[in-house]
Amino acid sequence: MTDVTFRVFRGTASDGGYQEYKVPLSEGMVVLDAIHHIQATQANDLAVRWNCKAGKCGSCSAEVNGKPRLMCMTRMDMLELDKPITIEPVRRFPVIKDLVTDVSWNYEINKRIKPFKPKPREADGTYRMQQYDIDRIQEFHKCIECFLCQDVCHVMRDHQRNDFIGPRFLIRMASLAMHPLDTENRLGELKDAFGIGYCNITKCCTEVCPEHIKITDNGIIPLKERVAGNFYDPLAWIWRKIRGKQADQRARVH
Amino acid sequence: MDHEIHEHDVIVIGAGGAGLRAAVEASNQGLSVGLICKSLLGKAHTVMAEGGMAAALGNTDSRDNWEVHFRDTMRGGKMMNNWRMVELFCKEAPDRVNELEEWGALFDRTPDGRILQRNFGGHRYPRLAHVGDRTGLEMIRTLQNHGIHQGIDVYMECTVLDLLKDGERVAGAFAYWRESGNFVEFRAKAVVLATGGIGKCYTVTSNSWECTGDGQALAYRAGADLIDMEFVQFHPTGMVWPPSVRGILVTEGVRGEGGILKNSEDKRFMFGYVPEMFKGEYAETIDEAKRWLAGDPKARRAPELLTRDVVAKAIRSERLAGRGSPHGGAFLDIATQRSAEDIKRKLPSMYHQFMQLGNLDITKEPMEVGPTAHYVMGGVRVEADSTATTVPGLFAAGEVAGGLHGGNRLGGNSLTDLLVFGRRAGAHAAAYAKDLANAPSVNPDQLREIEHTALAPFGDGGTENPYAVMQDLQKCMETNSGIVRDKTEMERGLEELARLRDRVGKLRVEGSRHYNPGWHYTADLRNMLIVSEAITLSALHREESRGGHTREDYPLSMPELEKVNTVVRERKGAMEHEHTPRPAMPEELERLLA
């Protein structure tokens, strides 16, 4: 059996470094298997998050040779095995220990998003929606909250802003904005507190999404258009002045 | 003693579907609620549920109603179910699905815009509301995003070590933060267990690291009864190759969408495995099964959609007869039954999972599948209406509770179970807490004892690696209390478990308390030992085969054993077991089974 060398970040933000481990390669092996092997045989206290091991829970995000990935979905045969494979915690969030980072910021941001507010049911007690009306939102609902998009987003990395919620939560905003039953208006905070304007659509988030959600094209750009239409369209502005109320902010986008 | 203390009216342990739903309900009653979970919020095992949630909405086939759902669930459970739980479940299921939609879930639609339902094993009509093959994700995210606005305090990455007692009644829970390793005390008037399953007691399982039988073991140590622990479901279709993914779930939705099972001789073998009980309800020829798939209402369901216990055993029999697939499973073929486009639309995560992990395109080639430990039907004994356990103030809902699913669970009944009984647990725990005249108090001696046990692996003298002990425990259960059992093996299993208990007493942990998975596993191991013993002891004493419990030495179902539950409980430091009579079913429900 061939041995593969791993360079794994061990320690905390203030006191950490790389340690090398050798792991025997087996058929179909993924990076998370190798980390588990190291844990069980060489470093019982190696900290790592994981749950489903099938790409469905989004827990095992890390940087594999500098690329943000789910370790459970990264097959060893995708990597160059004659060189050491470097495994590091995701960069955007503070390291707790080894491969585990503090992602609590994301949970705080999520709480700031106004909840779903459905319209009343039809007379027969049902909600009627056509499949083609929800295909796009179902795409957004595939998000497994691995936060790789948050990790790779350069606005998030460079500025560490609290006034920019990042691609994950822009996608959540899009899924609410396009939900056929929702009646809440969130355009104001999208423009100001949530900082959609900071995104300059470099699509780094889309590239790393393990669920292949077209974050920028299908989510962020339509949201930007709504914000522009609502706040910067002169005709709409006049219309609102005449009518004395806000224009319909929930025009459908397909 | 120096540690953090939190006080709530109700604490809920576990934040999957049942825990979240219970917390929402208790909070809506105006009480202070704490929700404690081992992982980050939204990562619980519910997220992996794929196929859908069963409810007799009658959208896709108007012949469906709660009574047919009742009949299917009882027969699927081989009549071992708690009939009152099944009755409540089938009646309330549609409301819970509709409620989830009202909270933002987006199920796939019928052409007239209602919730679409899909076929699944053991369900007479298409009954599962679903979102492609990621229904669990939709459920947990919807509950999570609803729950965070209900004033619930969430304690993430926090592991409960033991329940606290004040005399007979529950007084809270003692836990530790996974990050810091520091202890934390939760004082509460009522506690809801919603900790899920036990799959990690087996080597080949669809379950995540969290499923170590925590709630069953916490309840047991607190003096509660566990029932029917011998009934463990082995899902017929787990991945078998490559080794890295062995056990990962392949949704029953593949068969619901028309997937067929074949052996190495290219034969659709399930036609030969229809049990007496289900004769006349399934297609008898390939032609009839094809007509059923095409939507002919007169044709009967394909036998691939027999209940999970039946299909899992059939795959095993084919392998033992030398007709298995190259890696010891069967072939599951959807490629010849549906278009590539349909497959990618209805089973996107299966397509993705096989493509990425198995180098296999399921729109072109058959999958290799085999049984994997998936679900425990048994669990903490609860009162049907209130979910109250035998310990005052302690409630249980979801997989950790026993009774609803009897001897075998139908696919799709679990997700709905979480909502129906999660809601009931939250409501009844809240009512209990409100009615309580005087709040319970915590006994400091109990706290010291729990701390002492938890920290023992850091002391001198330990020799055992927790990872190695866990692997050996899994191997023991896989070999001796697996899909097919016999007396000799199970007796040997109990002896091995006794030796494993000694080894758990000598665990050694390296490093500090700071986010240390080796140490975390030592707490899990204590729970897994109890659950493994409960399964093996219960299985040894049920001398028959029924549903998920199959005995090589007692291959038949015994009518007199249908009338009893197996109960295990702790008395004087040892596990005792007995068979207790099950309540008789009222006549109006009995009639539905005809």
Image (cartoon, rainbow, N blue to C red):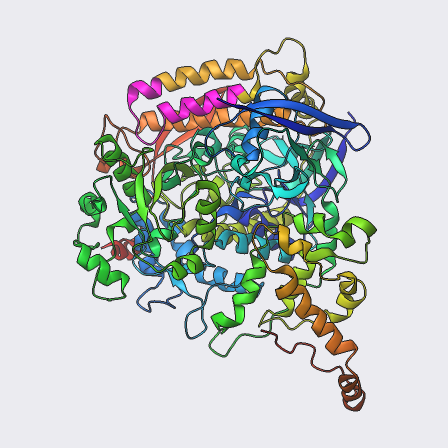
Overall secondary structure of the magenta stretch?
A: helix
The picture places residue A178, in percent across and down from the top left corner, at 61, 70
Residue found at the far top of this picture: B461
Residue drawn 40% across the image and 46% down it: B404
In the figure, residue B167 lies in which quadrant?
A: top right
Residue drawn 29% across the image and 55% down it: B336
Range of residues picked out in magenta: B468-491
The picture places residue B482, in percent across and down from the top left corner, at 36, 29
For the question of whether residue B401 can be seen, the reply is no
Residue B473 belongs to the span the image colors magenta: yes
Residue drawn 41% across the image and 73% down it: B111
Q: Quadrant of the N terminus of chain B?
A: top right
Q: Is residue B404 above or below residue A35?
A: below
The picture places residue B201, in percent across and down from the top left corner, at 46, 29
Question: For this view, does B532 lie left or right of residue B467?
Answer: left
Q: Quadrant of the C terminus of chain B?
A: bottom left
Q: Is residue A40 above or below residue B196?
A: above
In the figure, residue B547 lies in which quadrant?
A: top left
Residue found at the far bottom of this picture: A242
Question: For this view, does B85 lie left or right of residue B29?
Answer: left
Residue A250 belongs to the span the image colors magenta: no
Q: Is residue A203 above or below residue B358?
A: below
Name the one closer to the observer, B268 or B306: B268
In the figure, residue B444 lies in which quadrant?
A: top right
